[in-house]
Image (spheres, rainbow, N blue to C red):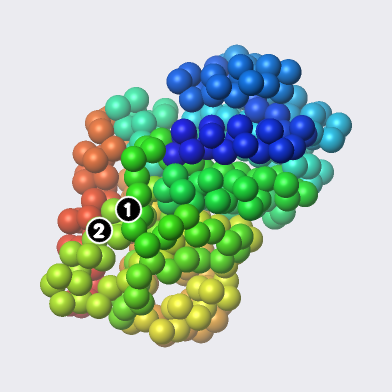
Amino acid sequence: MRQAFAQTMMELAAADPRVVLMTADLGFGVLEKFAAAYPDRFFNVGVAEANMVGLATGLAEAGHIPFIYSIATFATLRPYDQFRNGPIAHQLPVRLVGIGGGFEYGHNGLTHLGLEDLALMRVQPGLATIVPADPAQTSTALRATYALPGPIYYRIGKNDALHLPELEGRFRLGRIETVGEEGEVMLLATGAIAVEAAAAASLLRQSGVRAGVAVVATLRPEPSEDLRELLSRCRLAVTVEAHYLSGGLGSLVAEVIAGQGLRCRLLRCGVQTMPAGTSGSEEYMNQLHGLSRAALVKQIFTALGS
């Protein structure tokens, strides 16, 4: 999705002179075209995420729309105080871009794993939190939201080869997108892990279980009404997220079920233990933490059997 982000940024910058791109010494092989095309609107601040947020806050106050780019864990954890007290508190149009959430940087170990970013961002009032599922939806989401008046957090995956069939790049802020037909079991997924969720749904259908997929690409503003309608029609809701269980998509869906008094059962699939001391490919880490398609199917059959 990084290349889709970079290409869309080129288009936005060409159409809107307010667009500025900043990086904390990352994005090599991705951001060079933007830097060459718009050298007066590209800044590499070095390994200084908190300073980058401060600079972006000033640029936004001066009328620009700054996008600030880093790995998801660095983008959210290191400058959280500055982002909260600057763009969020003053409702300035700073766009925080976190790359590679979940286990996408799995070989680098715990320091590079974005497993709590969605919880941190979703809790902040007035901060749009957007998590596209594939490159096509990334481009659509950026075009649809880049000019919003307040701050935004985008979690964008690394893999540009991902493709979620039938999603076709659809995105609506504060809404969910159903992929294919609904079923008695609905897998609700956010971000790049939606591809595994869709594959798990396909395996379930081959086994005779009516399973559907819904992509939740907006965690704030919360798609509460869409969720209420969808959850009222299914037997088992399964949330799938490359994130800790607390605070992310599973928590959002649980809140809707409890708040609306729905009878739908909920199975939350996410990361339950800190992966300290363990590293490996994204595929390996997903398998280890129950997020591979096979592991998802096993958990769902267990829930249906109980």
Quadrant in which the C terminus appears: bottom left
Q: Residue at x 51, y 43 (%)?
A: 155
Judge the density around disc 1: few (<14), some (14-19), many (≥20) Cα neighbours within 10 Å: many
Amino acid type of the residue tagged 1 in the rendering = Val
Q: Residue at x 54, y 19 (%)?
A: 32
Front-most of residues 208 and 38:
38
Task: State the residue position of label 1.
Answer: 195
Amino acid type of the residue tagged 2 in the rendering = Ala
134 displayed left or right of 291: right
SS category of the residue bearing label 2: helix
SS category of the residue bearing label 1: helix
Residue 33's place in the image compared with 142, above or below, is above
Q: Specify the farthest residue to the right.
A: 62
Q: Which mark is residue 199?
A: 2
Q: Position of residue 154 (x, y in %)?
A: 56, 44
Q: Quadrant of residue 204?
A: bottom left
115 displayed left or right of 270: right
Judge the density around disc 2: few (<14), some (14-19), many (≥20) Cα neighbours within 10 Å: some
Q: Quadrant of residue 165?
A: bottom left
76 displayed left or right of 108: right
Q: Position of residue 277 (x, y in %)?
A: 28, 29
Q: Specify the farthest residue to the left.
A: 207
Quadrant in which the N terminus appears: top left
Q: Are marks 2 and 1 in contact (CB under 8 Å)?
A: yes
Q: Position of residue 276 (x, y in %)?
A: 32, 33
Q: Residue at x 56, y 66 (%)?
A: 175
Q: Does the image show residue 263?
A: yes
Q: Which mark is residue 177?
A: none
Residue 216's place in the image compared with 261, above or below, is above
